[in-house]
Each structure stands twice: as structure tokens, then as C-alpha cells.
Image (tube, helix red, strand yellow):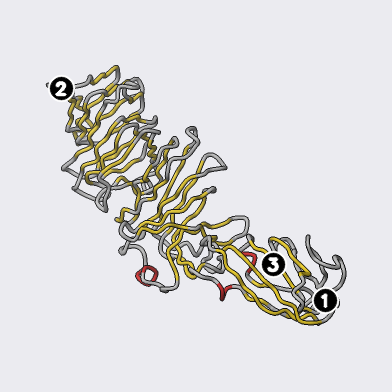
Amino acid sequence: MKFYLSAVILSLFFTGSVAAQTINTGDLKINPGTVFSTHFDFDNEVTGDVVNDGELILHGNFNNDGLFTFTPLSNSGFTRFESSSGAQTISGSLPSEFYSVLFNNNTIQPAFLLTGAISIAGNADFYEGIVDVDGSGGEIVFEAEATQSNTSDDSFVDGTVGRKGNNAFEFPFGDAGYFRPMAISSSGSPGNSFEGHYYLEGSDALYPNNQRQSIIEQIDKTEYWKFESQETSIDLALTLTWNENTTPATFINGNPDTVFAIVRWDVADAEWKFYPSAVDPANKTVTAAIRNDGIFTLARVYEDTPDNIVIYNGVSPNGDGMNDYFFIDGLADFPDNSLEIYNRWGVKVYDTQAYGINNNWFWGISEGRTTINKGEKLPTGTYFYVLKYVTLMGRTKDRVGYLQIN
């Protein structure tokens, strides 16, 4: 059986107006099975201590300048934000600790103006109403075991969402009236914390879309996600989604020779880089294993990349600065590679790993672990090369052809 308590109302008289508030200045404990409801603004003052292990129903604004929490390990405490008379402000000079919370307000969007800091340890039920963080300057954090439910275009967080711990989690955020989540898998670092943010705006001004690996055909130009980790090293799976309302149709229905993938802006190299990604068309999700945080979005990448590697098969190693070495353009995108060169009798004269990386080029000299006349300049003539490389899709590909040394 639930016990219902009526709120104690303190009337505050101002010039020309009267305002009613529910004010707590002392200790307020809401026990399990008890419902405390108020239709007026709730103000927990500096001297106030509120412990909610029962059910608190708030139909007005909420402000906390004292202690607002629940009993640890009780797995109880339900706060309901519900209004039929306009937006509700959630404010306070001190953080408010909720176990479970319901957002249910369909009178206006955004329905909840979060100017203070709140944390959620149980479940956040986004039944109806957008929680505005960006425009209101607040903070919302989900603790290690916290979950969220019922998110939709009608109810999500507009702004940054924090997450503690190493459990899998879907960030319940969006922008401009669209729910656009980001999900992470469980990780091996229980002490870590993360933040995420979705932006329904182009990334090109800050992260130029034309600065990208050659395998990337095009980048989603209308949206991106920001994912930050407290720890520098991470190892988890990141999932992004596409949505016909926010993702361009020309991108979704793009080049049939390309596939969806997750890309990240690499600060050091100042370019977008690709992650091998798994695509689930039914759920419109793209997932990739990541080891760094940063700026992410969706891209279309080529499934096969022979045209992105250009082989210049003439070498004249005379030191004049022209064609002094065997140049393969685009190979820097595929560092997991090997190159073998044979003379016309089929004798190997050159072999190496990671060709084209760190100035590792063939200069017309016999070298390698199993080559003949090692260290000697090779005579003029026609040679045969075998290039093997692992694509960013994880496929091993071969390129063979003739090389002319002049």
C-alpha cells in the first residue's frame, strides 16, 4: 500500500503577485511505498536534506541548493517530472542525485530546461518531453548501472550526456527535434567515464570533408557525433545510426560500389580516417571497434580500391630527382603490405614489408633477406613486381606488373 503525503505550502508574497512554493529547509525523507506530490515549485534550500526512497511527483519547477539523494544500495527512489502547464526548470547550485526518473510533459518543447546538474543511477524514462541541456547550460550524467528507456523524437536529451563505468550504453541524445543516439559496448575499464554529443550540423567548417583517406568516397555532410573518454586509451565498439530525416538521401542511396562506415577526424594527421565497420541495414546501424575518442560521423567507403593505388613503373636511379625510386601513390593508406621484385629469369632481387612507409622505397638496388647480389645496383632492363596489401576492409589483394629500370 502506498501512503500519500500532501505538500507543505509556503506562500511568498511579492509586490503585486503571490507565488506558492514547496520549500524544504530541513530533513525530508520519503520512505519506500510513500508518494510525495506537489503541484507547485519545489525548492530544496541550502539547509535542506532530501532522501527519496519512495516516489516524488513534481508538477512545477525543481531547484536544489542542498542535498538531494537516495539511500545507496536501496535500488529505490522514483522522481516524476510531470506538468500540464508549460516547461519545467530543473535547477540548483548543487548536483541532484536521482535513482530513477520519469520525464513526462507534452505541453511544450523543450519541456524540461536543465540548468543544474543531475545524475541518474537507475533508469531514466523518456516518456514525453525533450530535456534541454545545450540551451540551458545544465549537466546530466548516467551512473555505471543506469539505463534509459522510451527515447524517441518526442523525448531525449538535447545536449551533452555523461556516462560513468564500463557497461554498454546507448546515449539518449539528439538535436533539433530528432533522436539520434550513439551506443558503446562494454569496456575493460570500470573507472572510466565518457561524454557524448550529437550535432545536426555539417562538420566541414571545423573538420574539412575533403581531407580524407583515399578509400573514403564521401562523408555525411549534415551531422556528426562527439565522443570523449576520460582515459586516453580505450577499447570498445562504437555504434552510429543513419536516419532519413537527418542523413542526406544522396548519402544513404549513394554509390553502389561503396558501403557505410564510421570515420574519425584524426587530429595529428588532420584528415578523416576510416574504421572497418559492420553494417546492419535492418536497424540502420554502423558499428566499429575504436581505440581513440574524438569526432565521428558516417561515410561511404569503396569496397575495392584498385583505382586508388597508382603504380609508376619506370625507375631511373641516376640521382637527378626524377623517378629515382619505384613510386606507388596511395600505398600509405595500406601499410600492411609487401613488395617483391624479380628479374626476367625469375630471380628475386628485392623484397620488403611496409613498402612506401617511412621512406621505404626501391632505388634500383638489390636488397632484401633472400635476394642475390645484395647491395648492388641492378642493370637496366625489365623486371616483374608482386605487390600484396591488406585493404582497410581486411581483404588481401595482389597487384602484379612490369617495372622498367633505365
In the rendered image, the residue lying farthest to the left is 1
| Residue 281 placement (x, y as % from top left) | 34, 61
> What residue did someone put label 2 on?
5
Cα separation between marks 3 and 1: 18 Å
The amino acid marked with disc number 2 is Leu
In the foreground, 359 or 196: 359
Depth check, mark 3 against mark 1: the one in front is: 3
**Quick check: 129 above or below 297?**
above
Residue 317: mark in rendering: 1
Tell me, yes or no, whether the two marked residues, 3 and 1, touch with CB atoms within 8 Å: no
In the rendered image, the quadrant that contains the N terminus is top left
> For the residues carrying marks 1 and 2, which lies nearer the camera in this image?
1
Asked whether residue 342 is in view, the answer is yes
- What is the secondary structure assignment of the residue under circle 1? loop
Q: What x and y, as percent, mark residue 131? A: 30, 45
How far is the residue under mark 3 from the one under mark 2? Answer: 79 Å
* Residue 206 visible in the picture: no
Give the mark nearer the N terminus: 3 vs 1: 1
Number of residues whose C-alpha sits closer than 10 Å to that of mark 1, classed few (under 14), some (14–19) or many (20 or more):
many
User: Does the CB distance between marks 3 and 2 fall below 8 Å?
Assistant: no
- 94 vs 106, left or right, is right
The quadrant holding residue 95 is top left
Look at mark 3 in the image and give the residue it sits on: 339
Residue drawn at x 36%, y 64% is 247
Which amino acid lies under the numbered mark 1 shown in the image of this protein? Pro
Examine the rendered structure and indicate whether residue 327 appears above or below residue 12: below
The picture places residue 17, in percent across and down from the top left corner, at 19, 35
Question: Left or right of 282: which side holds 226?
Answer: right
Q: Is residue 351 left or right of residue 14?
A: right
Quadrant position of the C terminus in the picture: bottom right
**Horizontal and vertical percent position of residue 354:** 68, 61
Amino acid type at circle 3 is Leu
